[in-house]
Amino acid sequence: MRFFLTALFLNNRRFVLYCIIGLTGTTLDFCLYSALVKWTGVHYQIANAIGYASGTVLSFMLNVLLNFKTRDWLPLRFLSFCSVAFLGWASSAGVLFVTVARLGLDKYLAKLITMVVAVLLQYNLNRLFSFRKTDPGGARETGPGPATNLSPE
């Protein structure tokens, strides 16, 4: 089992680290969401936006420093990361609406469901756009390959 986990990590290091960093961002997101919903009575969609934005900023900083280690074009990368996060938030808001307003699920369980959808969507979009490597001249390369390839580039 240990060999399997080691091989899994080495073959998918960037994705595993993205998930660990994402867990940090989603923990902040979920804690803010829960606190706002429970203690302040803020509508769950507004709490979702505030929590999501906070988790996004934290995740970007940690991914820049620890995972993708790309420090060029940071304002453009941040804009790209926020655009991807906006798509993740929109999918999260849609899933929340369906699961809470239409299916009657618990707001906290529904929030956890949205996180799975957002992680898969955002990892692949960020890997392909926000943190794509550049050549030494500063031009962006064509990309790392298909979105299903989770191996390090």
Image (cartoon, rainbow, N blue to C red):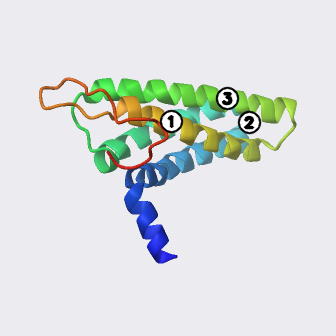
Identify the residue position indicated by label 3 in the image: 93
Residue occupying the point 45% across, 54% down: 16
Instruction: Residue 118: give x, y in percent of width and height.
Output: 58, 37
Give the secondary structure at mark 3. Answer: helix
> Alpha-carbon distance for marks 1 and 3?
14 Å
Closer to the camera in the image, 105 or 4: 4
Residue 41 marker = 2
Using the image, determine if residue 79 lies above or below residue 58: above
Residue 48 shown left or right of residue 11 in the figure: right
> How many residues crowd around disc 1 within 10 Å: few (fewer than 14), some, or many (20 or more)?
many
Give the secondary structure at mark 1. Answer: helix
Instruction: Residue 82: give x, y in percent of width and height.
Output: 44, 27
Residue occupying the point 66% across, 39% down: 114
Closer to the camera in the image, 12 or 42: 12
Instruction: Residue 20: give x, y in percent of width and height.
Output: 47, 54
- Three-letter amino acid code at the position of disc 3: Ala
- Three-letter amino acid code at the position of disc 1: Gln
Going from N to C along the chain, the mark reached first, 2 or 1, is 2
- Three-letter amino acid code at the position of disc 2: Gly
